[in-house]
Image: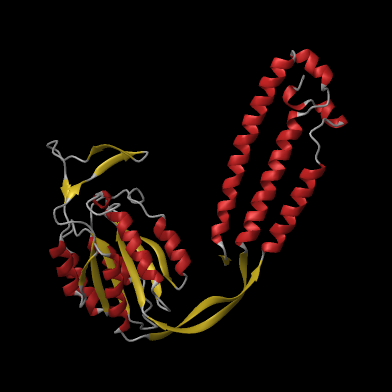
Amino acid sequence: MYQLEEKIWFWVLAVIPVIMVLFLVLQLWKRHARNKFADKELLRKLSPNQSLFKSVLKLIVLSLAIASLAIALVNPKVGTKLETVKREGVDIVFAVDVSKSMLAEDIAPNRLEKSKQLVTQIINNLASDRVGIIAYAGKAFPQLPITTDYASAKMFLQNMNTDMLSSQGTAINEAIELAKTYYDDDEQTNRVLIILSDGEDHSEKAEKVAKEASDEGIRIFTIGVGNTKGGPIPIKKNGIVLNYKKDNNGETVITRLDEETLKAIAKGANGAYINGSNTNEVVESIRDILNKMDKKEFEAKQFADFKDQFQWFLVFAIAFLFLDIFLLERKTAWLKKLNLFNENF
């Protein structure tokens, strides 16, 4: 397990491509100036030890020094001690709809990205609860088992997209059935399933499965993402809209938020429906719901001791800088023999 203490310093890495561009511009300018000054044969005699390879090598060494310094400033930490601790909380599984209809942009930036934002903000406001993630479309797929590692949960969440499942459609019942396997029967923790979807359920079995889940102690809360007026499903390439999805008759498909289906699913599992248009309201609603629930004690493994690792990267940075200082832009004897880049000037 590792932590990155000051991620903002990763911006230092942006200096590297700038330096490379400046180096390329400088080399082109030098070549142009030399060609105006004299022909190649005369230049070779005047500067027999000038080495392009050495210049490139110095650039690489300097880039490595900057990269090492940036990582040192970020200060990565490595967990060195794993402990089993007692925690109290609720087991929460997020089921995120990744069907193609979630690409509709009737809610900014689109339904799927909005869903990911909502889950991220909910996780940011949790304390000691455990979370799991499911992706579903025509089928359901486990993304992350129940864990207290919120960083991993958010990482898996950001990687979710509409191409991750080949089976299209929206089978909410599949997500509920899979969620049942996430909870540990031995621990008997309070169980919550939060479904984020536009409600276009193609299975027509979700209400029945929701009631079955309720009998097993699972409360289901649904969050509707989208607009009841609906919108088309864009077909994009490199971020540019090429067309919109059409039906068999060539008509543009309009997908709409089906709140009634989501309300029925939540009602059948002793839960509630929440409209997902306002992030703050969603987070507050979920927080109030969780605060009113009894917290069950469970065991969790976590790293209790982290050690700084910046010193290693600082040593590398200093070493590369010293190497850069003593690395001359002139050919050495071995370099003349190798004649890298076929340098004749």
Quadrant for the C terminus, please: top right
User: Which residue is painted at 41% across and 68% down in the image?
Assistant: 145
14 vs 235, nearest the viewer: 14
User: Which residue is painted at 13% across and 38% down in the image?
Assistant: 251
Task: In the rendered view, tell whether residue 112 sits above or below residue 273.
Answer: above
Quadrant for the N terminus, please: bottom right
275 vs 70, nearest the viewer: 70
88 vs 167, nearest the viewer: 88
User: Which residue is painted at 36% across and 76% down in the image?
Assistant: 91
Residue 197 drawn at (x, y percent) = 24, 60
User: Which residue is painted at 30% across and 58% down in the image?
Assistant: 114
Regarding residue 46, the answer to whether it shows in the image is: yes
Q: Where is residue 222, by image quadrant?
A: bottom left
Residue 213 drawn at (x, y percent) = 24, 74
Task: In the rendered view, tell whether residue 253 sits above or below residue 210.
Answer: above
Task: In the rendered view, tell whether residue 220 sits above or below residue 246.
Answer: below
Q: Say whether residue 258 is left or right of residue 82.
A: left
Task: In the rendered view, tell whether residue 76 sits above or below residue 18.
Answer: below
- How many labels sit on residues? 0
Regarding residue 140, the answer to whether it shows in the image is: no
Residue 7 drawn at (x, y percent) = 55, 60
